[in-house]
Amino acid sequence: SATIDVERFSKHFNQAPIIEVSGRTFPVEVRYRPLALNENESYSDKNNDFQPIIDAIDELSTESAGDILVFLTGEREIRDLADTLNKLDLRHTDILPLYARLSTAEQNRIFQPHTKRRIVLATNVAETSLTVPGIKYVIDPGLARISRYSYRTKVQRLPIEPISQASANQRKGRCGRTSDGICIRLYDEQDFLSRPEFTDPEILRTNLASVILQMTSLGLGDIAAFPFVEAPDSKYIRDGIRLLEELGAIHTKHNRYHLTEIGKTLAQLPIDPRLARMLFEAKRLGCTKEIMIITAALSIQDPRERPFDKQQASDEKHRRFVDKDSDFISLINLWNYIKEQQNILSGNQFRRLCQKEFLNYLRIREWQDVYTQIRQTIKQLAFPINSNTADYRSLHISLLSGLLSHVGMKELEKHEYIGARNIKFAIFPNSALFKNQPKWCIASELVETSRLWGRVVAKIEAEWIEPIAKHLVKYSYNEPRWSKKQGTTIANEKVTLFGLPIVASRIVNYSKIDPVLSRSLFIRHALVEGDWFTRHQFYKKNQKLISEVEDLEHKSRRQNILIDDDELFDFYDKRIDKSVISSKHFDTWWKQKQKSDPDFLSVEKKMLIKQSAELVNLNDFPDFWHQGNLKLALSYQFDIGHNRDGVTIKIPLNLLNQIKNRGFDWQVPGFRKDLIIALIKSLPKSLRRNLVPAPNYADAFLRRAISTGQSLLESLETEFHKMTGVKITTEDWQLDQIPDYLKITFSIVDNNNKEIASSKDLILLKEQLKNEIQQALSSLTTQKTVQIEQNDLTDWTFDLLPSVYEETHKNYTIKAYPAIIDNQNSVSIKLIDNQYEQQRLTKLGLRRLLILNIPSPIKYLHEKLPNKSKLSLYFNAFGTVLSLIDDCIACAVDYLIEKNNQIIQNRDNYQSLLNYTKGNINETVVDIAKQVESILVLYNNINKKLKGRIDLSLAFSLSDIKKQLDHLVYKGFVAKSGYKRLPDINRYLSAIEKRIEKLMVNFTKDKQSLNIIETVEKQYVTWVNSLPENSKSQEEVINIRWMIEELRVNLFAQQLGTPYPISAKRIEQQIDKVKSEL
């Protein structure tokens, strides 16, 4: 052969003689027409045209007649050039393509007689494989696709490369077979001479796995030491060995390679090792029949033809065989169809069928011949052949066993797969899976042309890979962690095959993988941190002692009392056996150990406390808060920034109405000094500098302070004044600057100890939970409670109305206060949460019950009241005369109840009061009406004086008078003010008249007095607004309001006199007094 390096062969075989038998050839003229082309650039890529080839054809057209053979790199280039030449409409010229995948009929056109000139466009198939008759001219671009295996990417590549001198001469010889010829080379002579003399032999550019397998089977020794004519590179040898290791065919022993049982079987099968491995696995999975068909098909060229001009028709014929998930099953479908047709058709009929349906008859015969050879070998190896159809999973796991490095994982949002060792490939367009691409696939081969393509592809599941590739997969672990549920260390395991994550993440038991770390995590998380399920008594005792020390830390707000976790870890680490790496291991070990030494793992409390820890007085941090007979649980939390940092008092909802607001501001003894220091620091600088250093003054206060019932702030103000002479007022304390942990948190819980609400403001909590408190009291379920609460009462039909109701519940006594509730047309009896509200509501309810049961005094009033008084009542500014009379009646009933001076708790008391009221109501209402008439006359006179134009200098004073009038006389003022206050209101109105008279003469003095009133009123209003709703209506609070009215009389109409000495200072003192009592 012209392409064999005979000199190398002769030298290899000890200078063997060479006998050369040359074929008959004619002289060939070589013309060089060089072009500036890149090494890997084809002529169709050069400016997107074939002008250099067309120019060469034009040049040869001037020569004598003869066919032209043009060498090109591939099918696509041939088609593109054919299209270009056909468009040129060359006269008396046929354009004929020639390449391996061409149908038999199209190939046969080359050999048919012809009259026109032919231009044959061929791949290097026309270089050595066949001789095209009648060729007189050759156009040689000097390039070809050379099959080369890449040991780096493990891919069979088909790169375009410059051909060797021997191949160029072979091409040149194609035009000198029958006559003189001309060869135009599209490169220069220097380029030709610089090329290698011969093409690399195939052993230097293919995978050597099959060669190594057979050599190892034959015992030919180390392949690297074998005397090849031209030895392959060691890198290719190592790559072939790696493939055999991938297939499980060889293993290393004493630095030599030996065949495994799989390898011994593979060596006996006359096919590629990958295909042989599929058959071996098929034996195990019971799908030998199908795998024999597939491996035979993969050993030959695809029998399905796809003529360029009949692509759609051929695709239509072949579509019936397509399986949407597997090109391998498509081959089985085609095989079954062929066998079926051969059984019913004669030989010639079958040939015609193949031609009609675009099937290559010779390749089908070749397919069947290879199948027969495989089947014969299989029988010799005693492989069972299944009679039933194999399932998809078994079939493709068998295929997978030989294609482990041809697995692909689809990239998201890309029509591309990541393969072994991070290569990227795409599914070949003629695959059934090209459009609907699965997440995971295998390809029978990976071939690089314009890009890397996967051919003959099938869908697989990732979970199939690991069992068949145990010897190849790599395991990596991350996030080892303790699992309380499993009682051991777990981790996320990642399984990869050649870099592909076939298992992205799964949780596995890590204890056997890293027993040292697992033991450490077990001790730290289970024994030290308590994150495990256990009933061991030693551990319960240890944890109880630890909790006691932790409570001490929370109470004292110190984190340096309990020993560090590391010290506790060391305690267990020194005692527990090294084999213990999980809860299960521990249970087994401890079961035996505790028999001989049950206290082996028990700790002592003193061991848990650091030697450097300061002593803490537990009496300063009580577990309960006592208020009267109530005992409330305390808890402590040391967690800066948390809303429960500090002390929390747990209060059952049923007891919330009994809890007094006083006392909590003093804090527990252990926090009291810190609280006082913080309060001192909150003072303005002008006051604070008198109390430096703050800790010393805090200590001094705590030594002097005596429980007097005062609030902490009042006590501080008193004692600091004694110490320094500096007066501090309530407004001076900046309570918002006090750290939250020094403010007690109140946690309100239901009967199930579940928290309902919490706050540091007890008054706010009571207000927010008012309805809940009422519901809780109403839901008491004893028989006694049911008898107390009643509705729709119009008379005293019940026996006793107790002042307080008590019921024991969970070691504490619930108190509620029965009250008579005014419902306008009736009354009801309800349990109320506090005494003040009980008294207020019962007063109104008792009034309503009496009014419902006494004759109306209106007729008597009409008879006894003078006409002038009647007119005043009729023309009041606060509604109808009837509503005013009702107000007078209500006031009269209230007065008679008070005058009767009885505690009304039973039916006899009530009846006595009712009789008394009936006997005195008429005269009392007339008396009240006359007083109201006098008040209304004064009120109207004052209003007249305030009308009209006023001097701007008097505006503030007159505005104050109007405001005072609105507070004295309004709708409902009679009953609300009460019988005893009516003369006072008359006097207050007279004082207003005197003030107006003086105001017109000397408004300056009025302004000075007004400033005093405004200061006192502001202080009073601010204080009242801060009170809970049920405290605002208490008599002590309301009386201060009347004291302010007396101060007005004293300032603006002193001649009218006051019932007691009055001044702004006395009012301030009374506010402080009432404030401390509430």
Image (spheres, helix red, strand yellow):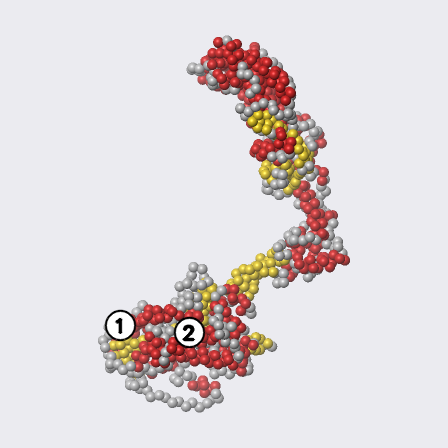
Q: Residue at x 56, y 12 (%)?
A: 923
855 with respect to 650 (left or right):
left
Q: How far across and how far down the image is residue 104, in percent?
A: 34, 78
Q: Quadrant of residue 148?
A: bottom left
Could you say which quadrant of the image residue 617 lies in? top right
Residue 458 in the image: above or below residue 214: above
Q: Position of residue 698 (x, y in %)?
A: 67, 33
Between the C-alphas of marks 2 and 1, the distance is: 41 Å
* Residue nearest the viewer, comparing 424 with 726: 424
The amino acid at mark 2 is Asn
| Quarter location, residue 688 | top right
The residue pinned by badge 2 equals: 336
- Which residue shows up at 31% across the image and 84% down it? 176
Q: Is residue 334 visible?
A: yes
The vertical placement of 500 against 1012, above or below, is below
Residue, x 39% and y 73% (percent of image)?
160
Residue at image point 55% right, 20% down: 852
Which residue reaches farthest right? 596
- Whether 453 is drawn above or below 913: the answer is below
**Image vertical order of residue 441 relative to residue 953, above or below:** below
- What residue sits right under mark 1 in the picture? 86
Q: As shown in the figure, which amino acid type bears the numbered disc 1? A: Asn
Q: Of callouts 2 and 1, which one flags the residue occurring earlier in the amino acid sequence?
A: 1
Q: Indicate the quadrant containing the C terminus: top left, top right, bottom left or bottom right.
A: top right
Residue 331 coordinates in the image, percent (x, y): 42, 72
